[in-house]
Image: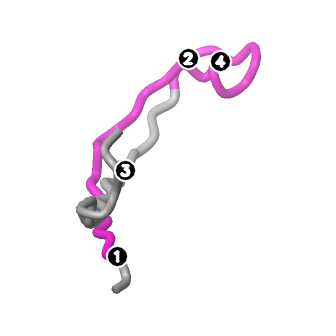
């Protein structure tokens, strides 16, 4: 049986950071849109595994 996976993407709003983090010597800030991805894996069958 093939394991299943579900991916959900969500708009996380604007992300603001200093321009100097992207380009040495730059001043000011930059704002970009951001997206978050949530990856859900199907539960695995652990009945045959050895306890840790």
> Crowding near pointer 4: few (<14 within 10 Å), some, many (20+)?
few
Q: Is residue 20 magenta?
A: yes
Q: Is residue 41 above or below residue 15?
A: below
Instruction: Tell which residue pokes out farthest to the bottom in this image.
Output: 1
Q: Is residue 18 above or below residue 15?
A: above
Counting from the top left corner in percent of width and height, residue 46 is at 27, 59
Q: Which residue is mark 3?
A: 35
Q: Which residue is mark 1?
A: 3
Q: Is residue 43 left or right of residue 30?
A: left
Q: Considering depth in this image, is 45 or 26 the residue closer to the camera?
A: 45
Residue at 34% of width from left, 76% of height from top?
Answer: 3
* Marks 2 and 3, the one that precedes in the sequence: 2
Which quarter shows the N terminus? bottom left
Question: Which of the 4 image quarters holds residue 51?
Answer: top left
> Crowding near pointer 3: few (<14 within 10 Å), some, many (20+)?
few
- Label pair 3/1, CB-CB below 8 angstroms: no
Residue at 39% of width from left, 45% of height from top?
Answer: 34
Counting from the top left corner in percent of width and height, residue 42 is at 26, 66
Q: Which residue is mark 2?
A: 28
Mark 3, secondary structure of its residue: strand
User: Disc 1 vs disc 2: which is toward the camera?
Assistant: 1
Q: Which residue is mark 4?
A: 20
> Crowding near pointer 2: few (<14 within 10 Å), some, many (20+)?
few
Q: CA distance from mark 1 to mark 2?
A: 47 Å
Q: Is residue 27 magenta?
A: yes
Counting from the top left corner in percent of width and height, residue 16 is at 43, 28
Q: Where are the magenta residues, as a range?
A: 4-29
User: Disc 3 vs disc 1: which is toward the camera?
Assistant: 1
Q: CA distance from mark 3 to mark 1?
A: 25 Å
């Amino acid at each position: 049986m093939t394991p299943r996976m579900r991916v959900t993407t969500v708009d996380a709003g604007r992300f603001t950071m200093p321009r100097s983090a992207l380009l040495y010597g730059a001043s000011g800030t930059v704002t970009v849109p951001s997206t978050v991805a949530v990856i859900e894996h199907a539960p695995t069958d652990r009945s045959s595994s050895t306890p840790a």
